[in-house]
Amino acid sequence: MNPRPSLKERIKIERQSMPEQAASDRQRNFKEVNLGFDERLAMLEAQRCIQCKEAKCIAGCPVLVDIPRFINFVAEGNLAAAAHSLLGDNALPAVTGRVCPQETQCEIECVRGRKGAPVAIGYLERFVADWAYQQPNQAPMETAPPTGRKVIVVGSGPAGLTAAGELVRRGHDVTIYEALHKPGGVLVYGIPEFRLPKKIVHDEVERLKQAGVKIECNVVVGKTYTLPELREHFDAVFIANGAGLPVFMNVPGENLKGVYSANEYLTRVNLMEAFAQSDTPVLIGKRVAVLGGGNVAMDAARTAKRLGAEKSMIVYRRGKAEMPARLEEIHHAEQEGIEFEFLVAPVEVVGTPQRWVSGLKCIRMELGEPDASGRRRPVPIKGSEFVIECDVVVVAIGSRANPLLTSTCPELKLNKWGFIEVDDQGMSNLPGIFAGGDIVRGAATVILAMGDGKRAAHAIDDYLKTK
Amino acid sequence: MHKILRQTQLSPNVIRLDVEASRIARTRQPGQFVIVRKGEGSERIPLTIADARTDEGSISLVIQAAGKSTRELVALQPGQFIQDMVGPLGRATELIAQGCALCVGGGVGTAVVYPIAQGLHRNGVQVISVIGGRSKPWVIFEPELRRLGEVVVCTDDGSYGRHGFVTDAVKDLLSQRKIDVVYVVGPVPMMRAMAELTRPLKVHTIVSLNPIMVDGTGMCGGCRVSVGNETKFACVDGPEFDGHLVDFDLLSDRLSTYRQIEQQVNARHEEACKIGLNR
Ligand SMILES: Cc1cc2nc3c(=O)[nH]c(=O)nc-3n(C[C@H](O)[C@H](O)[C@H](O)COP(=O)(O)OP(=O)(O)OC[C@H]3O[C@@H](n4cnc5c(N)ncnc54)[C@H](O)[C@@H]3O)c2cc1C
Ligand SMILES: Cc1cc2nc3c(=O)[nH]c(=O)nc-3n(C[C@H](O)[C@H](O)[C@H](O)COP(=O)(O)OP(=O)(O)OC[C@H]3O[C@@H](n4cnc5c(N)ncnc54)[C@H](O)[C@@H]3O)c2cc1C
Ligand code: FES
């Protein structure tokens, strides 16, 4: 191996760009867009890290991954050590390396970003994780001797999977109940294959199973079992059922044929594999209008294009700078020819006499005073209505707390929006019942859900010791 | 995995499957349903829990071969499996505690009305069932319903029971007896006609809606229906609603969303059956 370049040389290295499928090819396939760094690119990028003594990037990470440490191992070419370091801090790096909003978390803190581009922490994380998963004879997860304590995890999204891993490691008997027929939560039914290959989630689930986690699909807590029943039969419960209740626009024409919630549209395509011509149908629009400006909206618009739409549009009521989606997704969407209508809001879905969607009537907006979130509030411009011609409308304007589970346990304390209230340990007002992820925070992020899962698992472990 | 215990042909296109599902058998209530997925690549489809036996831990599904997914299910033989089954889903039927109830079933809907009639009977309510079919072989669940009370059978061609539609029989009953509530399950036009019949008489009428569903947990909103001008998710808010408030036009319209795709799928499926590809 070459001797380590000097700091001066390392400062000169430019940020390496992610190899990706050409936009013209990927517009019509569901294969992953980003191809990943190879070892050479990874080492080069890792050398850009100047190993700050007080690394700010760590504080930017919601689960406090020791970023400079694993990157240093990559720079040295010691991938085994890098993997050991990273996986010790973060249970799902192959996922977060792909879906975290790095530009607002770790990378925004990177000193190299002050003059030039920050270190590509997300790309390096993904590289190390993928490398680790490709190694034969991976060491199985080490687990403590059985404690005989039984814990139920409700939901198999990132919060549930992370909690289950941490709990089984401590010797507890863990069962996950999942409502759908496949584990993974939003990672399998929401985020498309071209952004997060399902194999990654599948492999992680297999690892958990090998470590002793039992996963029972097709169990809806609140229906198949109630929460009070679970409390009676188990020592602790971790609720991580996400925020699965779609929000609609509340405008006329919303029930016309061709209007989907993003949850339905993406579930049909991803979970039910409509993209692979399974038995589940989905309407292939010629012109698809997607409402919203977050990751969910980008995913829906890019999915529509891949299914064969001639035109796929994002319709957003604020401006480009206000879009909450990850920068990379917006950039990829633009490359793929997704069109953007900014500062417009829907007022009505218009239809044919046979009640199929034929357009989306919108009104133009202008930015007014900043609102509570600090973003300037869009206000409608009188008389500016116009119709966007389209045959499919996908509504991706957020999701709320699904009351199915919580309504079966009136003693459980909720906030005014129906999300579960917890203390800093993740415990609800009912002893032994913990919660985390989107059902506590509202629609948030994968990494925050994982952080909640980890924290709650530790708290559950402590709780079980005192009980 | 859920094992098929018995398969019984009830009418030319309706099959009863008794399937292992002990957990669901224990807790199901009248009006609730399951969502099944036969195997990899199959659709998730909702089916009402027509009956259950806690002793052997089984539930009964009564399935009308409508398209590809239901045809694959009715072809299952004892010893074979349904890969995924989730439930019991939906709200339980609002059962009255006394008085007289009419239970009206058309076609495969008769099987859906049966657990409701059972529940009413258990409550000590007088149950009168009115059931219909095209002709004699299409009438199902008559012996089971007879055990719970009076049964009026109607056939479209007059080959068995009363000649004519169930609506005619119900009209007569409503004029002769004091009926407290009417439960109706059947094709959309039949439920609509029944709601129109009882509306001027102000007889409370409960219908069971069958919109297209995916998850069955309120997550997708695909099953939305309009009741009293409010959007409801049938899988969690229903599937039963006040028939006088339901927008039936919207329901039948939304049910036709995939008709064109379904026809293509069915044609392909038939072709594959003919040349034996699916065996
Ligand atoms: C399309 C889309 C794209 C996204 N993109 C990103 C991104 O790029 N980056 C990012 O950080 N975040 C993204 N998010 C947000 C992120 O996915 C969520 O914040 C995260 O998945 C929340 O995790 P969770 O474990 O709390 O819940 P979920 O992932 O929602 O999982 C909850 C699980 O619980 C199950 N469940 C629900 N109710 C019950 C019940 N009663 N009984 C049993 N099981 C039940 C559900 O079926 C589900 O599997 C995206 C979300 C969507 C929808
Ligand atoms: C709560 C509920 C309970 C039901 N109970 C029964 C029952 O006990 N017995 C029975 O035979 N049928 C029942 N159905 C209807 C049954 O689910 C549909 O007939 C079946 O899904 C059709 O699928 P297919 O592929 O065979 O036919 P397709 O050719 O796909 O469709 C035929 C018609 O069925 C409807 N349909 C299609 N997909 C779905 C879906 N995913 N969900 C609901 N409807 C759909 C559409 O109107 C379509 O035009 C019930 C439906 C609901 C919502
Ligand atoms: S079936 Fe998805 S919300 Fe009812």
Image (tube, grey):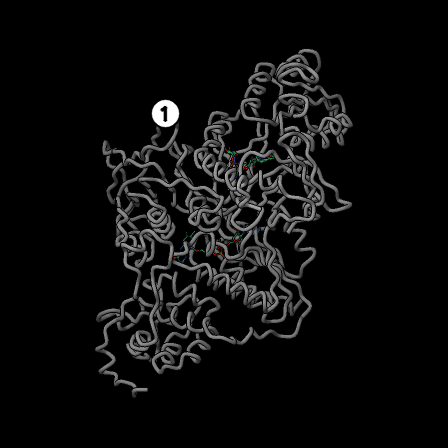
Identity of the residue drawn at 25% across and 38% down = A364
Instruction: Compare residues B180 and B247 and report the one nearer the observer.
Output: B247
Instruction: Compare residues B164 and B188 and report the one nearer the observer.
Output: B164
The image position of residue B256, as x and y in percent, is: 46, 31
Position of A354 with respect to A178 (left or right) is left
Position of the N terminus of chain A by quadrant: bottom left
> In this picture, is B186 found above or below B73?
above
Could you tell me how many numbered marks the image carries? 1
Is disc 1 surrounded by few (<14), some (14 to 19) or many (20+) residues within 10 Å? few
Position of the C terminus of chain A by quadrant: bottom right
> In this picture, is A333 found above or below A108?
above
Position of B262 with respect to A311 (left or right) is right
Q: Amino acid at mark 1?
A: Pro
Looking at this rendering, what residue extends furthest in the bottom direction? A3
Read off the chain for label 1: A
The image position of residue A209, as x and y in percent, is: 58, 65
- Does any portion of residue A284 appear in the rendered image? yes
The image position of residue A322, as x and y in percent, is: 29, 51
> In this picture, is B8 found above or below B166?
below
Q: Quadrant of residue A108?
A: bottom left
Q: Quadrant of residue B53?
A: top right
Position of A217 with respect to A243 (left or right) is right
Residue underneath mark 1: A353
- Does any portion of residue A372 appear in the rendered image? no
SS for dot 1: loop
- Is label 1's Cβ within 8 Å of ligand 2? no
Identity of the residue drawn at 67% across and 25% down = B137
Position of B16 with respect to B224 (left or right) is right
Instruction: Compare residues B273 and A339 and report the one nearer the observer.
Output: B273
Identity of the residue drawn at 66% across and 55% down = A231
The image position of residue A96, as x and y in percent, is: 41, 64
